[in-house]
Image (cartoon, helix red, strand yellow):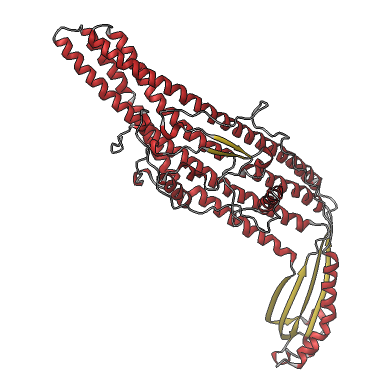
């Protein structure tokens, strides 16, 4: 049951509370000094590389298994969100899944995004009235000399509900909120960039591990072949069929081949350790499965985003644009701070010298006040802050342009790399086939006495180089294909991980695509699934002539 004196007091304060919130409502519309955001336009081009025609396909390379497949560029298509699954390697999928779960770079970006979100919520609280409840109980003695009477001692009990509100007349609070909102978007894009970087590095490092493993196995096979040849030459020398110089030359060639093995083992160890770090593990605690380059499937359909879409897809470009919005809001914030700041406050409560009369009508108190503060002279601080903010905006614009140029350069380079990798593999495979024939023929003719040992040794060296070159070229095709996916910004992001701008743009693109084929606009957008992949079984490579297809799968370096 409500005390009758309290009902009287609230009826008395109602007009003042209505006045307080009415004034706040009239002033909340306010104004803003934020300049119009001028985002530099994307380059007006439909191609990444010079030339009238874009490359449509790469060359197919016979005899190299899946690594020699023909690749086709699908311009304007979206990149698959789990793009690494296009290599059809269950082991590779598992490694990427571990990296997504355990890599500290991703975890750091997630924490930074959570912090940015809470900072945004914190600054947005200024748009609401601030309520506080204060209570005080004390006993004091009043001086009689100060008030021309006898001194007296009394108790004082006070309780107040205070309300304060800062009307955003000049838009300062909205500008601060927009700045923090853009900072949250920047951290969201930083998280996407962390995902993309870790995924790309995991794939390329795994390819490097498999490549070094294949090169090690090839080199060991060459060493076994050369040891066998040395054994035969020693027997021939024993029976006087060849001079001792042939034995020395073969020993020198064997030692030279053996000397190439330790650097490969070192590179393998370095790549394996780097992969362990990407997976969030200490190298000594990583149980890495055997990665065979021959079991990787080369993606044959390569979606290539159009230049107009790249600026909406790459996280680093989107992050630079978010930083541009932060700098733009900072200019308006610097201008708004040059104008008056207004504060409205009100309070209602009870005050009495006796607890027995605390709830009497005579104990009711209230206050209503407003304050205005404006800087008259600060030695040029505010003007300097405004100029600094404008220069920061200019710097953000150039940073955005630089990011776009770098992105287009990376895509253009990646496209050419995929094209040239196929040509390089074709030439190295041709050199390997010819070198193998020449080496076998040289062995036969040497045993027959038709040629000298120097000719045989020359064929042997060329054959060795061509075998390793095929392995390296095939591995480079996988690495550069992964690099193309990364350069294009990876896949699309689900609503939980995407920013408002990404969702809006993806919805517009989906509706535009459906309109071109005569389908009505969609009401929702599927931007992809950024989930932890479980992996699938990789397909086995059939046997063939290429050295990358004849590795001993049970042998570890």
List the single residue furthest toward the front: 518
Q: Is residue 442 above or below residue 303?
A: above
Q: Quadrant of the C terminus?
A: top left
User: Residue 241's image quarter?
Assistant: top left
Residue 371 in percent (x, y) is at 83, 65
Farthest left residue?
239
For residue 462, side relative to residue 192 (left or right) = left
| Viewer-proximal residue among 123 and 505 | 505
Quarter location, residue 5: bottom right
Q: Position of residue 419 (x, y in %)?
A: 54, 29
Q: Number of labelled discs?
A: 0
Q: Residue at (32%, 30%) from the top-left corner?
A: 217
Residue 327 left/right relative to 201: right
Q: Is residue 159 left or right of residue 304?
A: right
Residue 404 located left or right of residue 37: left
> What residue appears at the point 53 percent right and 30 percent down from the top-left corner?
58
Q: Residue at x 45, y 50 (%)?
A: 97
- Compared with residue 408, is residue 22 higher up or lower down, i.e. above or below? below
Q: Position of residue 265 (x, y in %)?
A: 34, 31
Residue 323 % position (x, y):
68, 46
- Quarter containing the N terminus: bottom right
């Amino acid at each position: 049951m409500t005390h009758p004196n309290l009902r009287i007091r609230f009826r008395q304060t109602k007009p003042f509370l209505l006045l307080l919130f009415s004034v706040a409502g009239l002033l909340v519309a306010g104004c803003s000094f934020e300049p119009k955001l001028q985002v530099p336009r994307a380059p007006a081009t439909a191609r990444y590389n010079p030339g009238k025609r874009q490359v449509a396909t790469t060359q197919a390379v016979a005899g190299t298994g899946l690594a020699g497949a023909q690749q086709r560029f699908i311009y304007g298509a979206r990149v698959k969100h789990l793009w690494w699954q296009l290599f059809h390697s269950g082991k590779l999928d598992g490694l990427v899944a571990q990296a997504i779960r355990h890599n500290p770079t991703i975890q750091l970006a997630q924490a930074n995004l959570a912090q940015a979100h809470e900072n945004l919520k914190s600054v947005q609280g200024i748009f609401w009235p601030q309520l506080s409840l204060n209570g005080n109980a004390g006993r004091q003695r009043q001086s009689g000399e100060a008030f021309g009477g006898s001194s007296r001692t009394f108790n004082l009990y006070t309780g107040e509900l205070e309300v304060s509100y800062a009307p955003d007349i000049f838009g300062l609070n909205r500008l601060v909120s927009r700045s923090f909102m853009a900072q949250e978007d920047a951290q969201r894009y930083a998280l996407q960039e962390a995902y993309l970087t870790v995924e790309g590095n995991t794939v390329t490092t795994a390819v490097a591990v498999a490549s070094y493993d294949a090169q090690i196995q090839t080199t060991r096979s060459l060493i076994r072949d050369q040891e066998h040849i040395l054994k035969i030459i020693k027997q021939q020398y024993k029976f006087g069929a060849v001079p001792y110089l042939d034995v020395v030359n073969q020993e020198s060639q064997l030692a030279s081949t053996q000397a190439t093995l330790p650097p490969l083992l070192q590179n393998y160890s370095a790549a394996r350790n780097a992969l362990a770090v990407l997976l969030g593990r200490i190298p000594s605690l990583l149980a890495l499965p055997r990665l065979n380059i021959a079991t990787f499937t080369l993606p044959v359909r390569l979606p290539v985003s159009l230049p107009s879409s790249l600026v909406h897809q790459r996280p680093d470009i989107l992050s630079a644009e978010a930083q541009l919005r932060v700098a733009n809001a900072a200019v308006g914030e610097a201008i708004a701070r040059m104008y008056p700041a207004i504060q409205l406050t009100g309070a209602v409560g009870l005050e009495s010298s006796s607890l027995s009369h605390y709830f009497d009508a005579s104990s009711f108190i209230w206050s209503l006040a407003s304050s205005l503060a404006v800087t008259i002279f600060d030695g040029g601080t505010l003007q300097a802050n405004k100029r600094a903010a404008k220069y920061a905006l200019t710097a953000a614009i150039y940073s955005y342009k630089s990011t776009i140029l770098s992105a287009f350069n990376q895509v253009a380079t990646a496209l050419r790399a995929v094209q040239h990798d196929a040509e390089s593999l074709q030439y190295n495979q041709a050199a390997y086939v010819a070198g193998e024939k020449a080496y076998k023929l040289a062995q036969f003719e040497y045993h027959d006495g038709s040629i000298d040992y120097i000719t045989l040794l020359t064929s042997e060296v060329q054959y060795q180089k061509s075998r390793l070159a095929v392995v390296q070229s095939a591995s480079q095709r996988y690495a550069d294909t992964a690099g193309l996916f990364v350069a294009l910004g990876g896949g699309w992001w689900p609503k939980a991980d995407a920013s408002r701008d990404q969702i809006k743009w993806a919805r517009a693109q989906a509706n535009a695509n459906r309109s071109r084929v005569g389908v009505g606009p969609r009401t929702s957008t599927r931007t992809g699934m950024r989930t932890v992949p479980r992996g699938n079984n990789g397909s086995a490579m059939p046997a063939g002539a290429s050295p990358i297809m004849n590795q001993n799968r049970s042998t570890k370096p």
